[in-house]
Amino acid sequence: MLILDGKTASNEIKTELKAIVQQFVLEGKRSPHLAAILIGKNSASETYVASKVKNCEEIGFRSTLIRFDENVAESELLQAIAFLNADPEVDGILVQLPLPKHISEQKVIEAISPLKDVDGFHPVSVGKLVQGLPTFIPATPYGIMLMLEHFSIETKGKHAVVIGRSNIVGRPMSILLSSNLKRGNCTVTLCHSHTPNLKEICLQADLLVAALGKPEFVKADMVKEGAIVIDVGISRVDDPTAKKGYRIKGDVAFAEVAPKTAAITPVPGGVGLMTIAGLLKNTLQAYTNSL
Ligand code: NAD
């Protein structure tokens, strides 16, 4: 059984990106610039954004973090996005989700210029993805595709089962795996909360992607011998014995599932790190598109 280590794979990508940025800077160009907007004080969001900013700095990208209070007016947020859209020195814009209830997520997503939509959530980006056109791919599915590539996982002709149909993970994942791509060409079944016979479907999966947000939901009796398992889930589970008072758990019961698989991603240390790599690649793409 192979552990699909996100650290090795993402470090390799980051090293490549760093060298590319160094070259641009040597040529007298500015470095790529990611602007992140964070609203309120959600501790998971704080962690994710801090990690994105840190990773930008590590590879020589510029990053700007714009913070708003939990009660910020929607109009003020939209104005800030318009300002970033118009700034020629900002390449990528991301607004960390989830948003406070009084702000429309859809309005915010649609306010970001498709040219700077490095999260790939804008309907223009999604439409291009569906049509197989070059675009910004949402960072998590993109990171998973990069991971499959890094570990040379053959996907052609396989039955891929994706659990979860969210716009940020499950649905774009199902589109990519079914697309005519080097790491695509799967026959895909997309499962969700109304799928009645989930266990039977999962047992048919050569490649299983779990993205439902329920800690250790996928048990050994749901996984075929020799399957490849990609665990997207990140849940904080209370644990008084842990330093922080909680542990991060994936959607897969790793200890019992791993021995049955051909390859599996750990949590933490798997898809999460690849998501950042996907975001960094999108930001570089936005930058080179603008040159
Ligand atoms: P979401 O809540 O938006 O979507 C969950 C999906 O799972 C829904 O489509 C729902 O229909 C489906 N689902 C829920 N319960 C189910 C069940 N019992 N059986 C079948 N399907 C079921 O979640 P999301 O934003 O897609 O995130 C999913 C998980 O991935 C979360 O744990 C999240 O924290 C994690 N995540 C990780 C990364 C990363 O970088 N590793 C990035 C994004 C999200």
Image (cartoon, grey):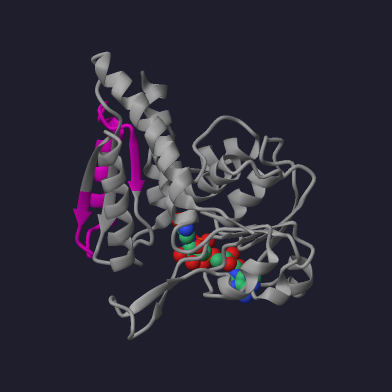
Q: Nearer the viewer, residue 255 or 137?
A: 255
Quadrant holding the N terminus: bottom right
Q: How many marks?
A: 0
Where residue 216 appears, x then y in whole percent?
A: 56, 75
Q: In the orientation shown, which residue stands out farthest toward the top?
A: 27
Q: Nearer the viewer, residue 120 or 186?
A: 186
Residue at the location (49% across, 56% down)? 270
Residue 145 in view in this figure: yes
Residue 82 in view in this figure: no
Where residue 255 appears, x then y in whole percent?
A: 57, 73
Residue at the location (74% across, 60% down)? 226
Q: Nearer the viewer, residue 112 or 243?
A: 243
On the image, which quarter does residue 41 sit in? bottom left
72 left or right of 13 in image: left
Q: In the orientation shown, which residue stands out farthest toward the bottom?
A: 240
Which quadrant contains ligand 1? bottom right
46 left or right of 8 in image: left
Q: Is residue 40 above or below residue 38?
A: below
Residue at the location (38% across, 82% down)? 238
Indicate whether residue 40 is drawn in magenta: no
Which residues, given as a range, are shown in magenta?
A: 66-94
Residue at the location (44% across, 37% down)? 13
Where residue 62 appears, x then y in whole percent?
A: 24, 35
On the image, which quarter does residue 31 sit in? top left
Quadrant holding the C terminus: top left
Q: Is residue 185 above or below residue 70?
A: above
Q: Nearer the viewer, residue 109 or 11?
A: 11
